[in-house]
Image: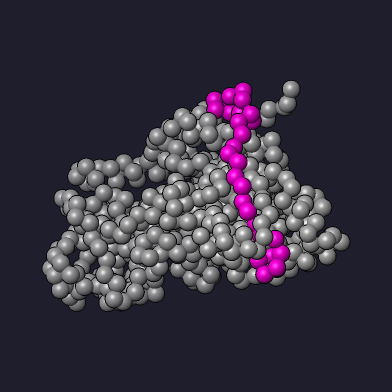
Amino acid sequence: MRSAGPLATVQDLGRRAWQHMGVPVAGAMDSLALRLANLAAGNPEGAAGIEVTLGGLEAEFLSPARFAVAGPGTGVRLNGTPVPAWECRKARAGDVLRLDAPAAGARDYLAVAGGIAVPPVLGSRSTYLRGGFGGLEGRPLRAGDVLPVGLEVGEPRGPVPPTLRPDYAAGAPLRVVLGPQEEAFPEEALAAFLAGTFRVTPRADRMGCLLDGPRLAHRGGADIVSEGIAEGSVQVPGDGRPILLLADRPTTGGYAKIATVACVDLPRAAQLLPGSEVRFAAVSLWEARELLLWREYAVGRYKEGAG
Amino acid sequence: MAHVPVPVLRPCGDSAVSVELGEGIDLAVNRRVHALGRALAARSHPGIVALSPAYRSLFVEYDPRRCSFEELALLVEEAAQLPDLAAARGAEVEIPVCYGGVLGPDLEEVAAFHGLDPARVAELHAAPVYHVYLVGFTPGFPYLGGLDPRLHTPRRATPRERVAAGSVGIADRQTGIYPIESPGGWQLIGRTPLRLFDLGREPPFLVPAGARLRFLPISREEYDRLAGA
């Protein structure tokens, strides 16, 4: 690792089995991009890769390897030559891969054939920064780090079909399922949430992002008896400013949640940058699942090599 | 015959459900939450990804590719009908605590707030068998119910930036233990030499949700001996 930029961490699909012990899930913010980068490189979709936030990564291959980048991926260069994202490439020992900040979106994912072979902690290789464990010594990557790569290397696949690549630049509303506490908000607040335009504040990290826009009033108070929190939940504390909770969210929380981003749109939510505009559109639970199942069908076809 | 409430399923997006089994912070409701978690875990449905008990609700994360909301709702309803749902009791854990001094910097203040002697506060705190309602906030943090009403104390007006691992605190009606160093606003009355969360140990967690917990007062010498071990 010659440089790691503002924040690069090792991530896989997260530490799901320990939420009942207060351990956050962590994992790739844009799990679809990590899965597709892995599949392109010939890895199992849950292999650990590098989540590169806002570019700035420069890494030298110490041995020959195949790799794939997925995500907005507009600033990828191998030895100075632009390299397309969403497809597997070969690197020789001594080659230098550079990821610059993407034109739209926040995070790119680098998968290396064999996967990043840091030791799993509680069943996952994901870095959990606040807890200081997982990934490489529980911390962000930095210049001088040498990352181990696994030996089990599968057959690479062809480029990820364009229909599977999210349009990170389009700015379409994030589709949400209302609830679990939509009745904690008066009609006007629900209407303002669905009609309004919000802006991502500088308080945006792997835990979540604070949104600025119409203030959302509560019917009674903002507090509920603490309960589990889903990825993509939009909680609204007493000040009426919604917080979109993402990969590093705490396992439980005590604020009313107005809506939850549908799984199919979590990859786009994970790419929001401070200053980005965000709007929400309600879908039914059944619509949300239908959209996800169609996408997963397409991922499955790509995985089987029919893509 | 106790009234058995029908679970209320609140979808949290398309991959999780919060199953509510009652209102507020209530021991009987929380026992049912843990029992429902165990009953669902025993079914080991491949679509269920994670089960996390909270105070009055069980958070169920599922894989929408392998399980529909309707299928999950049926599973929950069946599991919730088990007659002995509230009967099962959790494990019992003993936590040695050295009260007061530098290890419990707020003991004097808590005692003054209630007009009690600090030793009496420690005695009242160590008397009950607590119930672990849930584990959350940081890895391994147990939220304990059963605090003597004479010790209910508001949180500190200004939270501390760093609370030492092992600190035992009080916040309103609750008491709990900080497993790792973290910020925190609870009133700190003592500290345990035990490590509640230790990745070098198998299992890394000492106190599971649903367990019963007792505090054992120990001297400073005993604390140092155990902490040094």
| Up/down of A50 relative to A99, above or below | above
**Any magenta on residue B80?**
yes
| Up/down of A19 relative to B80, above or below | below
Q: Residue at x 57, y 33 (%)?
A: B36
Residue A16 placed where, x, y %?
Answer: 44, 48
Q: Residue at x 39, y 74 (%)?
A: A6
Q: Residue at x 78, y 49 (%)?
A: B148
Q: Is residue B183 left or right of residue B71?
A: right
Q: Is residue A125 left or right of residue A77?
A: right
Residue A215 placed where, x, y %?
Answer: 65, 63
Residue B53 placed where, x, y %?
Answer: 57, 42
Identify which residue, B177 or B86, lies in the foreground. Answer: B177
- Range of residues picked out in magenta: B77-105
Q: Quadrant of residue A69?
A: bottom left
**Any magenta on residue B99?**
yes
Residue B55 placed where, x, y %?
Answer: 64, 44
